[in-house]
Amino acid sequence: MLESFPERIPELTDLDLIIIGGGPAGLTAGLYAARANMKTVLLDSKDVGGEILNTNVIEDYPGFESVTGAELAKKMADHALKFGLKIETYKPVKGIRSEGDRKIVTLQDGTELSAYAVIVTVGGEPTKLGVVGETEYHGRGVSYCAVCDGAFFKGADLAVIGGGDSAFQEGLFLTRFANKLYVVHRRNEFRAQAILQDRLLGMEKVEPITPAEVKEIGGNGDVKWIDIERDGKIERVKVEGVFVFIGFKPVGRYLFREHIDHDKNGYLITDQYMRTSIPGVYAAGDTRAQLAKQITTAVGDATTAVLHAERYIEELKDLERAFPSEPKEVVAQTASKADLVVFAPDDIVLREGDPADRFYMVIKGEAEATHRGPDGSQVVISRFGPGDYFGEIGLLNDAPRRATVRAKTSLELMALDRETFAKLMKSSQATEDEVRRVAAERTQAATPR
Ligand code: NAP
């Protein structure tokens, strides 16, 4: 699909962002990153498109009443390319590790790329039945993709295994070729959406076999039958193709040697911004723990991930400028814990006399600190612009705020909680000395003579 790409990986050692996986989530992240002018590369082990390439017709992506998976994948890729995304296909990733404030992505061929942030959108792989004959007949009648293999089975009797959306959607596709289609499911109730159930089970050539479990797949070089167990009895069903859709195994976590939080099924756990437990690593799409594995949710989550990654990188660079002696990995941890807070002009950020709970650094805009003078009037004692910090005095002295800080313009601040600030101070004596020096200077300047 993407013939125009260079064969060789160019110098890619100082990137902002690496996106791993070119399905809908990855391509959306790529589109947003390219539009934000982030230095980004998207890597895919195959051609871009991901799972939707294995999907015949998509009918639940808003704006597209009916579109083939291949067509939607091409539209998404073309869209991202138009805005300048660099896509590298057939570049499988072997591993990701943290090094200072960077993520190092190693490809199977040994090439190393580095970036401040990584978004993992690698999806997963189909779950296997684990029965005798499944591996032996894979590619000779056993398949996990109807769109890829269905056409090889014109006029044949086929079985789909599973009761979810995939089984039904792929089953519908297979009815184009099948003489007879069995839907073998371990329970009587199906999980698939009602509309898919009505369509598939309403067809004359379709016969559900439930509750039934596949016990063995057999044949004579090619698949000829499956043995199923129903009501405690083994029955042999003659089929030439077995299409297995019994779920999905996320693969994102296998890219990391260091620990990354995942649930009991291996899905990566993220917060609302798609941050994983590793600073600078985000996850979106089917490899992330979530309620719905849909294209719509994948693109939404990817948008959140890239917008947050952009802020994370900005905050990381601001922190590095402000605290040059800080170890780089501590800066990355600090940036990953930071909250972005916004204020309108004239809003009060913190008020004199209030307890001190956060440390702030200005990302965008201006703020002003005032102190109540002896006559009760407000005296301006400091002005803050991008890169300046405030709020340190109360935290260092465990004392109430000595000043009121107000937004002069629209204001974006990075906020660190007490614990994150304390860790930052503890990890470098030079940083603590410098912050204490600034605090002492400010305290002196605000003290009436
Ligand atoms: P799924 O929803 O998890 O369904 C898997 C099916 O396989 C279930 O019916 C399950 O049975 C059965 N199963 C699981 N393990 C089995 C085993 N060892 N032996 C026999 N049967 C087994 O998986 P999916 O259909 O691949 O869908 C994955 C996600 O993608 C879902 O969230 C789905 O909604 C989404 N999706 C959406 C669309 C769409 O058109 N919007 C299309 C495809 C997929 P039980 O029901 O008994 O657990």
Image (cartoon, rainbow, N blue to C red):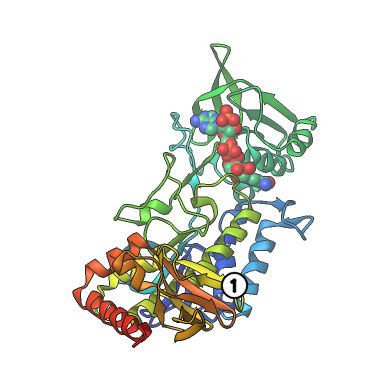
**What residue sits right under mark 1 in the picture?**
31
Frontmost residue, 109 versus 374: 374
Q: Is there any visible trace of residue 270 in the rendered image?
A: yes
What residue is at 46 percent from the left and 61 percent from the top? 282
Q: How many marks?
A: 1
- Quarter in which the N terminus is drawn: bottom right
Q: Kindly tell me whether mark 1's CB lies below 8 Å from ligand 1.
A: no
Frontmost residue, 63 versus 177: 63
Q: Position of residue 172 (x, y in %)?
A: 72, 41
What kind of residue is marked 1?
Leu
Q: Is there any visible trace of residue 161 in the rendered image?
A: no
What residue is at 35 percent from the left and 69 percent from the top? 394
What residue is at 45 percent from the left and 64 percent from the top? 354
Residue 85's place in the image compared with 260, above or below, is below
- Looking at the rendering, which quadrant does residue 189 occupy? top right
- Quarter in which the C terminus is drawn: bottom left
Residue 225's place in the image compared with 36, above or below, is above
Mark 1 burial class by Cα count in 10 Å: few <14, some 14-19, many 20+: many
Frontmost residue, 430 versus 192: 430
Q: Residue furthest top?
A: 232
Q: Residue furthest left?
A: 429
Secondary structure beneath label 1: helix
Relative horizontal placement of residue 257, taking residue 17 as reference (left or right): left
Q: Position of residue 293 (x, y in %)?
A: 59, 48
Frontmost residue, 447 versus 173: 447
Q: Quadrant of ligand 1?
A: top right
- Looking at the rendering, which quadrant does residue 410 occupy? bottom right
Relative horizontal placement of residue 24, taking residue 10 as reference (left or right): right
Q: Position of residue 224 (x, y in %)?
A: 56, 30
Q: Position of residue 350 (x, y in %)?
A: 48, 70
